[in-house]
């Protein structure tokens, strides 16, 4: 954290990608008289999560919600703001190569399914849907991973196995080396690819009608020292995110989680519950302990 006392301006190293909700904050339409967010992280923010947690490469920024839950469990010095910057429905993120036959959700029991990392947020949400909506016993699936998680302390559950060095999950899916794969933007653009969940967008809409929430992918965090020493900066960051969201296209806002603790309480609780069920976190957290006195007062 760099500070220019003469100008009363603090500059924070920030890991924040450009999305509809963050565009105005990144392009200078939203500014602050006391803090500058130096968005020096990688273009794909998830590439900055590991250095953020292991090396303190950034002072603040976005973090996958599941990664934050792990960080909290393992005592990492980060504090959550009730400020999602990226969310989406995940029903379409489970695919397979139809060249090797049709696959339904229950068919993956006893089979191998690929996912980049077991603790990946997309993987968590998709597995939860498969378990709770389609009756899949996740313990009967062998999960093939290609990368480590972001937290050094975390170890995958016993039914995970690492792919051979250099193998990528999308390639393995297309080659038929895994029965299916949980993939976000890495899903191959190929006519042979089918979604494991039939008509996934309709299924997601029905799930939203019933559950009333959009799954959180990434949410804003700050180092605990900033929250302790400069609560005014934390409040200012929250204001800036709110203003940036207000300048986003209306259609984009319809597909994103809201701001605030109470409006996100159900989604955060579901992320906690499913993370614990899937052995991604070692204990069940409460929603309120994700925040400190400063961030917990943000509405």
Image (cartoon, grey):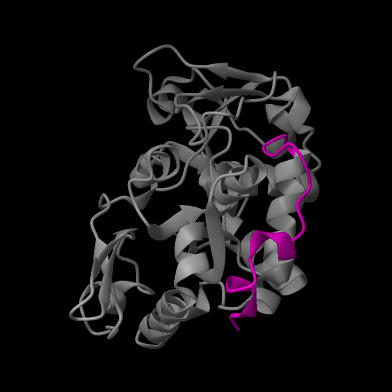
Give the quadrant of residue 292. bottom right
**Quarter of the image where the N terminus is located:** bottom left
Left or right relative to 4: residue 242: right
**Quarter of the image where the C terminus is located:** bottom right
Q: Nearer the viewer, residue 287 or 94?
A: 287
At 56% from the left edge and 77% from the top edge, which residue is drawn?
A: 258
Left or right relative to 192: residue 100: right
Q: Main secondary structure of the magenta part?
A: loop
At 30% from the left edge and 81% from the top edge, which residue is drawn?
A: 34
Q: Position of residue 204 (x, y in %)?
A: 63, 62
Q: In the image, which residues are magenta?
A: 278-299
At 56% from the left edge and 62% from the top edge, which residue is drawn?
A: 80
Q: Position of residue 212 (x, y in %)?
A: 71, 73
Q: Position of residue 144 (x, y in %)?
A: 55, 22
From this view, report whether residue 188 is shown above or below residue 14: above
At 63% from the left edge and 33% from the top edge, which residue is drawn?
A: 103
Give the quadrant of residue 130. top right
From this view, report whether residue 226 is shown above or below residue 135: below
Q: Nearer the viewer, residue 270 or 109?
A: 270
């Amino acid at each position: 954290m760099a500070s220019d006392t003469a100008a009363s301006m603090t500059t924070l190293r920030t890991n924040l990608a450009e999305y509809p909700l963050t565009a105005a904050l990144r392009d200078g339409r939203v500014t602050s008289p006391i803090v500058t967010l130096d968005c020096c992280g990688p273009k794909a923010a998830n590439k900055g999560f590991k250095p953020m947690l292991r090396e303190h490469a950034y002072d603040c920024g976005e973090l996958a919600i599941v990664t934050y839950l792990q960080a909290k469990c393992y005592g990492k010095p980060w504090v959550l703001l009730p400020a999602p910057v990226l969310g989406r429905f995940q029903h379409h993120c489970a695919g397979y190569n139809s060249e090797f036959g049709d696959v339904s959700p229950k068919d993956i029991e006893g089979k191998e399914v690929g996912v980049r990392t077991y603790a990946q947020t997309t993987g968590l949400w998709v597995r939860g849907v498969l378990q709770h909506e389609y009756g899949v016993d996740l313990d009967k699936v062998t999960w093939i991973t290609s990368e480590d998680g972001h937290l050094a302390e975390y170890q995958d559950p016993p039914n995970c196995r690492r792919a051979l060095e250099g193998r990528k999950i999308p390639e393995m899916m297309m080659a038929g080396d895994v029965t299916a794969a949980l993939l976000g933007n890495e899903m191959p653009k190929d006519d042979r690819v089918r979604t494991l969940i039939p008509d996934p967008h309709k299924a997601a809409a029905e799930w939203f009608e019933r559950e009333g929430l959009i799954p959180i992918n990434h949410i804003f965090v700050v180092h605990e020292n900033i929250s302790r020493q400069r609560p005014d900066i934390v409040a200012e960051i929250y204001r800036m995110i709110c203003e940036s969201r207000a300048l986003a296209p209306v259609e984009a806002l319809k597909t994103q989680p809201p701001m605030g603790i109470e409006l996100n309480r159900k989604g955060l609780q579901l992320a906690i519950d499913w993370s614990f069920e899937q052995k991604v976190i070692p204990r069940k957290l409460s929603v309120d302990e994700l925040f400190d006195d400063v961030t917990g007062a943000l509405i």
